[in-house]
Image: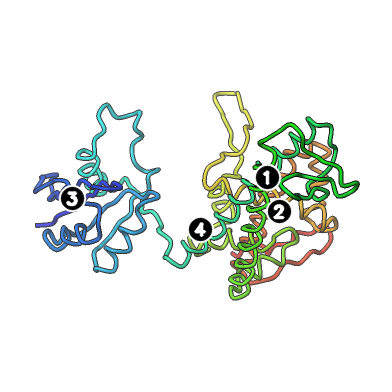
Amino acid sequence: MSIGLGIDLGKRTSWYAAVEDGDILVDDGRVPSTPRALTDLVELYHPEVVLLEASSITAWAVDALVAYGAPVWPVHPGSLPSRRSRRTKTDKIDARLLVRLWRAGVVTKAWIPPPELRTLRNLARTRTRLAQDRTRYRNRVHSHLNQEGQRISLGEVTLQGGRLFSRRGKTAALTAHPELLAAYRVQDLLTEEVRAFDARIEEVAKDLPTVLRLRSIPGFGPITSLAIYAEVGHIERFPTAETLVAYFGLDPTVQQSGDSLKQLGISHKGPGWIRGLLTQAAWAHVRYAPDSAVSHKYQRLAKRIGKSRAIVATARRLVKVAYWMWREQTDFESSGRTPVYPCRPP
């Protein structure tokens, strides 16, 4: 008797379905979402496979089941039927559906990064989100200062005695906006947190050879390099540079019907925060490495399609550069207008 165990994982409780060959339901039910409850199911049914839909709450369950020795198969959510195509969707149905689709061979296995990579991801993500929050609060401060007719930057403002002053003439910069002081204090606190994360990332990155190699690309700082390393994990997961580009959602899309062919924008799939970092890195690259082959390509594209679209193409090209540097274990080299990444191996 061969049993497949499908688990629809929830935050507090999870629904399971033990299904034999021939789609025969042996048992199903609801259990607490705890490592002990999941391992008890494995001990009870001895399944040939344990199936869970990969999500933001799946990692702990996979870790617990793998440590127990269970044959875990995290199912990629993109290979499952969409909710719109299903008339009824319940936890009970989903748990059994996982086993049915796995036996039909129509689902793909998701890659769950190990705990050490998840820690690096959280480090880079948290730093990025803190910087984004800081930018929002800084924009609020600038907005209120502009309403008061104060054309000064935050670097020229100081907080003294519960009031904001301009350092240039020690004149009061705040008279009418109670939100301004709060926004200024929050952005000041966020700046301290960002600096602390920057120091932590620098400390972690210096012990990672791949991150140091990626940092040799002009425009790739420690945050961008660590983010790419933590998000990719193992470069062997991607057979070509184009698959890595598609993973980051920078691949161009096309809509074709009959004789009609439309070139659309990028797919925007995958981690959006990485795309933001790559776009910033592309701007930094063309600014600080104007003589590299990538920058020369950007300059030609910018004249033809505009700077905004050209910088996205540049970010895509830098991903390919990073891919081959990682695969070939080489540092960045800029040599005129020739490609800066190794040729594809035969």
Mark 2 closeness class: few <14, some 14–19, many ≥20 residues within 10 Å: many
Answer with mark 3 or mark 4, whichever residue precedes in sequence: 3
Q: Nearer the viewer, residue 73 or 101?
A: 73
Label 1 vs label 4, nearer the camera: 1
Residue 235 horizontal/vertical position (percent): 53, 63
The circle on residue 31 is 3
Question: Looking at the picture, which amino acid does disc 1 mark?
Answer: Thr
Residue 80 at x, y percent in the picture: 34, 41
Mark 4 and mark 2 in contact (Cβ < 8 Å)?
Answer: no
- For the rendered model, the colour scheme is rainbow
Q: Are marks 2 and 1 in contact (CB under 8 Å)?
A: no
Tell me which label, 2 or 1, sits earlier in the chain. 1
Quickly name the residue at label 1: 135
Q: Earlier in the sequence, mark 1 or mark 3?
A: 3
Which of label 2 and label 3 is nearer to you? 3
Q: Which residue is mark 2?
A: 281
Does the residue at mark 1 contact the one at mark 3 (Cβ under 8 Å)?
Answer: no
